[in-house]
Structures are given as structure tokens and as C-alpha cells.
Image: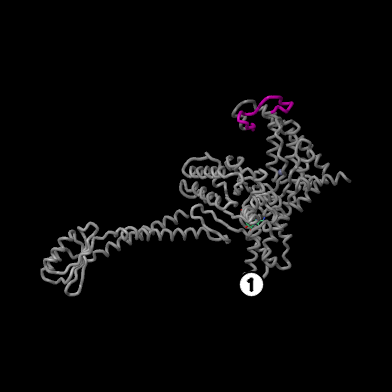
């Protein structure tokens, strides 16, 4: 789009230039009068006076003759001397202008200036078109394209929810306010922080709020701005950005969509990739280049940490990661409150209820919802928003295919809650797995209705058989809970079942953990676990054997299933309590979850 626009401007400039040259050439010698016409005119005495304008060399030039009739004409001569002699011989008065010296100014500099002015004009227009919107005090940097907000009015108060994230970022604010305090004691403050989360969860907002809290300038640029043009442009933009930032330190540099530049290197060929690599290299050079406490904090946002080049995550670069998660019920209510501040609401609008109905909505979605409602209210000529406006906007905001899948019905929510509670309880009570770090039923947008997160596993050298069995039990826990409570199962557990099956199969074919099969490896070298068809291909073992393996896998799964079900039934009270808490809060922490068990012990 932008490249095309540029091309059009270029063509327009060329056309204008051509037109100017054509006009100037044409205007110079308007008549077809020649030197032989002059001889004739002199002979019949129709010439009153004559002026000669020699060119720079003094040989050629133009001649203006004035006729006795009052008319005049100008023409070109190849020898001004000859014209002058002819006129003097005929007794006509001749004025000879001095040979011009400074004429290059008119012939070269003036058109050049005109073109320059035109170019600048278009460039400014182009830049304005791109830099528009957003409000605030912004200055465009023609080169780096970064936007500078000198005094961000946004503070942490404008960021609803995200309590943990804000606490994590508090020290950055303090550092920016008073870098000296930290340097004195030799504390090292991270240079780069990666904000990870879905679009619209408030990453940009957080970065702006840090700048606003610390009252420092805020530079923002999108990763895609670096890579849209020609080779080398991105790298030079990065350089300009950091030069500008250093002049304004302490300050915040915010790079949105960093994955556009910082994708893993060497994953492709061709110009585009070269350009991206150059840009990324320059970014790394710049980040390594400024000192630890120079007062520049680079915040970058992405929702794809997995595709980032590991080089940017190294110490001294983006060595701190902060996950910005979609809001839970309480968070959503707070966000609604923030955005409803200057929107008058009718009595029948219940923000709490809206929050409950919008599981999976991001902050941006909620802002959008209220904005749509305000538009609807205004269009109906009302000065306040009624519940009906919100209900209608709901359909509009939630209509996108992607977002529709995020709208969860009460029933689905309940199923997910019990499913996750089933996983969580087994994590908690089985000895070799867990503990549970967080349980959530906020849709993640990638098919999963929720998740149960254990603390990161210790690096254990060996997996034991009992640990593997417990892993399988945990995986099955979700489905078992569904079965116990609803007497029915859903398709939601398919990835759980896959994981359980894979573990069980590995136990049999790789680790020799089945007595019946024995300590024999039945696995391909590339680590793929055999399944029916593959067996036939590699002919490592017979059909009969593969049947036995399948039977063993089934036996392990069945055994785990039975044990897991028994365990969950033992803790049925906690299962209900956990599911209810999840339905209320959508996301519960380790402490909240463990609290469910403690109250039980006290009784
Ligand atoms: P991201 O950078 O993560 O894509 P943004 O920070 O640009 O998301 O958020 C877009 C808009 O959504 C914000 O301008 C704000 O209006 C709204 N928003 C998002 N999260 C929050 C929040 N936690 N509190 C208040 N508003 C929010
Ligand atoms: Zn599950």
C-alpha cells in the first residue's frame, strides 16, 4: 500500500519536472525568425533597434529585434558577433548585454529547489497520513518512525486488573524516576522486558502507564515498521530510534509486535529475510550497546514468544518476561468500570453481570463493547446507555468468527470448571506430580477451554514408573470429573487422552515398564512411538507383538483410569468446591486452591 503510494508520487514529480522543462524551452525562442530573415529585414530597413544576449561562452546567444512597426521578436543565433556586425553596418543601434556569469543559478538551482519543495511537501503529507490518530503530543521522526509521547497522561490507575503485572513493573517505574538510587548500590535493572499476551490485553497500555507513572518520554514503534521497506532501512531505523532514545533518557522504548523483526533467524532465504536479519542484528547491537543503567528500558510486546529468536532472550537483552493474561471476572468488571467512567449508564446496566457474561473478552473487546453501546445510545438520541444498547452491541462485538468461539455458555463453563478441577485435584493429591500453580477456565483462544498449570517441573534425570502413571492419571482426571458429575463426556478432553496414550505407549515400547512385554525397545530411532501402520512398514516386530503392545497400553490406561476415578471420588467435596470457586473467579491461585483442602482438614 505505502510503497505503491510512493510510486505514484514519484511519477507525479517526474511529470511536473518534464512539464517545467518543456515550458521553459518553448518560451525561450518563440519565433521562427532566423539570421537570414535578419539580413533581409536590415536590407529593407524595417528594424529600429536590436539587443543581443550572449550565452555563457559569448559565441551563441539570443537576439531581440524591435521593428519600426513596433513589433518585436526573439531568436537564436550561432554567432552573436556576426549579428552585431550586420546590424552596425546597417546603422541600427545595438545593445549588447554582458556575458552572463551567474546563470547556472537560474538554470539548475531554481528547478532543483522547486523539486525539493515538492518532495518535502509530499513527504510531510505522507507522514501525516500515517502518524495520525492516537492523540497526545506526538512528534514524527521521519527516520525512525517512532512516535514520541513526551508526557503520557496514562498511569497505573487507567490499567484495570493486571495486579501482578503492575507489581512486577513497579520497580521499573522507581528506577526510571530515580536511576541514581539503584546505580549507587550496584543494582542491575533489566534493559529489556518482554510483555507476552494476546492482542488487546493491555500490553501497550501497561508500557504507556509506566512512562506516565515515571513521567518519562515514551517512544513507540511497531516491529512491522522496521521491515516493510528496502534492505537496510530497518537497520537504520533501529539505529535512529536508539539515538533518539539516548538523547531523551531516561525513557521507555516500546516495540509492539516484536515477532515481526525478531523471528528465529536462518529460517528462510531471500531478500525479505535478509532485511529482517539485518534489522534484528542491529536491534541486538543497540541493546548490547547501551549500558545497564543508562536509563533506557526497552519494552517489547508479542503473543508469540515461541517463534522469537533465542538470541533476543539472552541476559542483557530481553531477559525478563511478563505474561499479560486475559482478564478474569473481577478484572473484566474493573476494566468495564474504567471505560464506563465518562459514559453515563442507566440504572438497569449491571457491569458485574456483563463481566460474568464475557469470559474470554480482552480489555480491548470490553472497551469496544462499551464504545459501541455509547454509539447506539447517541444514535437513539439518549444521553445515557441502557442495558438494551449493551445487549445489541454484544452481538456486534462478539460476532467475529474468532470471538464467537470465545463466548462461552453457562453450561460449557460449568463443564470446563469440573474438568479442570478434576485435573487439579489429582495434581494436588498424587505424591509425584504438582503442586498446582494456577487453575483457570478463561478460554485461551487456541481450542482449550481452560488450563491447570503445575509449577515448573524439576529437572529430574529419571522418570519413574509411578510418576508416569500419575501423569496419566492427571491427564485423565478432567474427563473422569466430567463423567462423575454430568454422567456424560465431551470432546474437550481429546488432547488429554492423546497425552495419556502417548505416555502409556512410551512406557511399554521405550522404557520396558510392562512386565508382559519386557525390557525391549519397540520404538523407531527418531523417537516416534509406533502405531499400527508404521509397524508394518518397519517390520521391526510382528503383528502379534503389536497387538500385545496395544493390549498393554490399554491395560495401563484402564488401571490409571480406575485409580484416578477412585481418588477423585474420595475428594468429591473438594471437586465441587473447586469447580464452584472456578465458576466464581475463573482463575484461582495456588493459595486459593490449597485453601479448599485446608478447611477440610480442620473439620
Ligand atoms: P495490546 O497492546 O495488548 O494489544 P492495548 O494495550 O493496545 O493491547 O489495549 C487496547 C485497548 O484496550 C486499550 O487502549 C484500552 O482501552 C483497553 N484495555 C486493554 N486492557 C485494559 C486494562 N487492563 N484496563 C483498561 N483498559 C484496557
Ligand atoms: Zn483437560
Q: Is residue 29 above or below residue 280?
A: below
Nearest to the observer: residue 178 or residue 41: 178
Residue at left offset 65%, top offset 68%: 377
Q: Position of residue 515 (x, y in %)?
A: 74, 26
Q: Position of residue 97 (x, y in %)?
A: 22, 64
Task: Say if residue 260 shows up in the picture.
Answer: yes
Most common SS among magenta residues: loop
Q: Which residues are magenta?
A: 511-532
- Is 516 colored magenta in this rendering? yes
Direction from residue 160 to residue 309 in the image, left or right: left
Q: Quadrant of ligand 2?
A: top right
Q: Position of residue 504 (x, y in %)?
A: 71, 33
- The image quadrant that residue 98 belongs to is bottom left
Q: Position of residue 549 (x, y in %)?
A: 69, 29
CB at disc 1 and ligand 1 closer than 8 Å = no
- Is 547 colored magenta in this rendering? no
Q: Where does label 1 land, which residue? A: 381
Describe the element under mark 1 as helix, strand or loop.
loop
Amino acid at each position: 500500500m505505502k510503497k505503491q503510494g510512493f510510486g505514484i508520487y514519484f511519477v507525479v514529480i517526474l511529470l511536473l519536472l518534464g512539464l517545467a522543462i518543456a515550458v521553459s524551452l518553448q518560451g525561450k525562442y518563440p519565433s521562427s525568425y532566423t539570421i537570414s530573415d535578419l539580413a533581409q529585414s536590415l536590407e529593407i530597413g524595417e528594424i529600429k533597434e536590436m539587443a543581443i544576449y550572449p550565452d555563457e561562452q559569448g559565441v551563441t546567444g539570443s537576439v531581440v529585434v524591435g521593428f519600426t512597426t513596433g513589433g518585436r521578436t526573439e531568436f537564436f543565433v550561432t554567432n552573436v558577433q556576426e549579428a552585431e556586425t550586420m546590424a552596425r553596418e546597417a546603422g541600427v543601434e545595438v545593445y549588447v548585454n554582458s556575458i552572463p556569469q551567474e546563470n547556472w543559478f537560474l538554470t539548475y538551482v531554481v528547478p532543483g529547489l522547486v523539486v525539493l519543495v515538492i518532495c518535502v511537501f509530499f513527504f510531510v503529507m505522507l507522514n501525516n497520513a500515517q502518524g495520525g490518530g492516537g492523540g497526545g503530543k506526538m512528534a514524527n521522526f521521519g527516520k525512525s518512525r517512532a512516535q514520541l509521547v513526551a508526557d503520557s497522561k496514562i498511569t497505573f490507575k487507567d490499567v484495570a486488573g493486571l495486579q501482578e503485572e503492575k507489581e512486577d513493573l513497579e520497580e521499573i517505574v522507581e528506577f526510571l524516576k530515580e536511576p541514581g538510587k539503584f546505580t549507587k548500590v550496584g543494582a542491575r535493572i533489566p534493559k529489556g522486558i518482554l510483555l507476552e499476551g494476546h492482542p488487546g490485553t493491555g500490553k501497550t497500555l501497561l508500557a504507556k502507564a509506566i512512562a506516565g507513572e515515571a513521567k518519562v518520554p515514551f517512544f513507540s514503534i511497531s516491529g512491522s515498521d522496521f521491515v516493510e521497506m528496502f534492505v537496510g532501512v530497518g537497520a537504520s531505523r533501529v539505529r535512529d530510534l536508539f539515538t533518539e532514545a539516548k538523547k531523551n533518557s531516561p525513557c521507555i522504548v516500546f516495540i509492539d509486535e516484536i515477532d515481526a523483526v525478531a523471528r528465529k533467524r536462518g529460517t528462510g532465504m531471500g531478500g525479505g529475510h535478509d532485511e529482517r536479519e539485518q534489522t534484528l542484528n542491529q536491534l541486538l547491537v543497540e541493546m548490547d550497546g547501551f549500558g545497564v543503567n543508562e536509563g533506557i528500558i526497552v519494552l517489547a510486546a508479542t503473543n508469540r514468544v515461541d517463534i522469537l529468536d533465542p538470541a533476543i532472550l539472552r541476559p542483557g537483552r530481553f531477559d525478563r518476561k511478563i505474561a499479560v493474561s486475559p482478564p478474569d471476572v473481577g478484572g473484566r468488571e474493573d476494566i468495564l468500570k474504567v471505560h464506563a467512567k465518562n459514559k453515563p449508564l442507566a440504572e438497569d446496566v449491571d457491569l458485574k453481570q456483563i463481566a460474568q457474561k464475557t469470559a474470554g473478552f480482552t480489555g480491548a473487546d470490553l472497551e469496544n463493547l462499551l464504545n459501541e453501546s455509547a454509539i447506539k445510545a447517541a444514535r437513539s438520541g439518549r444521553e445515557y446507555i441502557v442495558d438494551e444498547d449493551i445487549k445489541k452491541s454484544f452481538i456486534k462485538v462478539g460476532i467475529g468468527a474468532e470471538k464467537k468461539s470465545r463466548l462461552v455458555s453457562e453450561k460449557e463453563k460449568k463443564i470446563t470448571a469440573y474438568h479442570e478441577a478434576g485435573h487439579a485435584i489429582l495434581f494436588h493429591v498424587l505424591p509425584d506430580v504438582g503442586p498446582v500453580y494456577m487453575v483457570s477456565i478463561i478460554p485461551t483462544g487456541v481450542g482449550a477451554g481452560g488450563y491447570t498449570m503445575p509449577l515448573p517441573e524439576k529437572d529430574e534425570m529419571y522418570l519413574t514408573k509411578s510418576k508416569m502413571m500419575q501423569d496419566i492419571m492427571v491427564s485423565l482426571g478432567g474427563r473422569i470429573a466430567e463423567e462423575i458429575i454430568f454422567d456424560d463426556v465431551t470432546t474437550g478432553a481429546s488432547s488429554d487422552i492423546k497425552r495419556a496414550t502417548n505416555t502409556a505407549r512410551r512406557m511399554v515400547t521405550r522404557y520396558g515398564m510392562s512386565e508382559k512385554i519386557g525390557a525391549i525397545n519397540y520404538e523407531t530411532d527418531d523417537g516416534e512411538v509406533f502405531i499400527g501402520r508404521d509397524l508394518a512398514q518397519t517390520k521391526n516386530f510382528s503383528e502379534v507383538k503389536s497387538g500385545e503392545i496395544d493390549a498393554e497400553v490399554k491395560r495401563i490406561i484402564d488401571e490409571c483410569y480406575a485409580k484416578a476415578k477412585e481418588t477423585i471420588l474420595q475428594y468429591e467435596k473438594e471437586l465441587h468446591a473447586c469447580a464452584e470457586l472456578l465458576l466464581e473467579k475463573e482463575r484461582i491461585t495456588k493459595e486459593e486452591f490449597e485453601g479448599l483442602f485446608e478447611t477440610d482438614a480442620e473439620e
